[in-house]
Amino acid sequence: MKNKDQIKKIFIEVASILESESKWTQLWKARDEINLACNALSKNACKFSVEGALIKVLFNNKIKIENPIYDECFDLLVKSLGRSHMDKVSKLQQWNDDSSFKDVQNLFTKILKSLE
């Protein structure tokens, strides 16, 4: 992996955003404090799906969609789920919505271990 250190830093930040179950959400990328769905980049967002948290961290680190690191992060995330890279976003959303918070924690433990 070409950008391993930067990708590890990104996933540490994502895991930090999702440090507690109260900061994780399902059925939408992000929610505000009264649990209404919102954009992951909204200043009101305070709960995130796995995908929403990754989008927020990439944006905060000024990593745009055309940057190869953007795809590398999503590829690693989907690969860690044991799913094909085809239609990454829908597979990621489906996994998030079908999972428990413990599954989310285990996913980030697996990803960070793979980046050691």
Image (cartoon, rainbow, N blue to C red):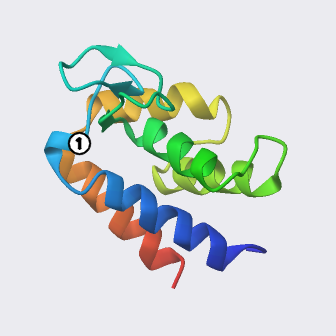
In the figure, 29 relative to 67: above or below?
above
In the figure, 27 relative to 86: above or below?
above
Q: Picture coordinates of residue 85 (x, y %)? A: 66, 41
In the figure, 54 relative to 76: above or below?
above
4 to the left or right of 111: right
Identify the residue under disc 1: 23
Q: Picture coordinates of residue 60 (x, y %)? A: 58, 50
Quick one: which residue is furthest to the bottom in this view? 116
Q: Which secondary structure lies at badge 1?
A: helix
10 or 71: which is nearer to us?
A: 10
Q: Residue at x 26, y 31 (%)?
A: 25
35 to the left or right of 29: left
Disc 1 crowd rating (10 Å Cα; few below 14, some 14-19, many 20+) is some
Residue 55 visible in the shown view: yes
24 to the left or right of 3: left
Quarter assignment of residue 115: bottom right
37 or 83: which is nearer to us?
A: 37
Q: Picture coordinates of residue 87 (x, y %)? A: 65, 28
In the figure, 73 relative to 97: above or below?
below
86 to the left or right of 8: right
Q: Picture coordinates of residue 75 (x, y %)? A: 65, 51
Q: Residue at x 19, y 46 (%)?
A: 101
Q: Residue at x 78, y 74 (%)?
A: 2
Tag count: 1
Residue 107 visible in the shown view: no
Quadrant into which the N terminus falls: bottom right
Q: Residue at x 51, y 32 (%)?
A: 41
83 or 59: which is nearer to us?
A: 59
Three-letter amino acid code of the residue under disc 1: Lys
Quarter assignment of residue 110: bottom left
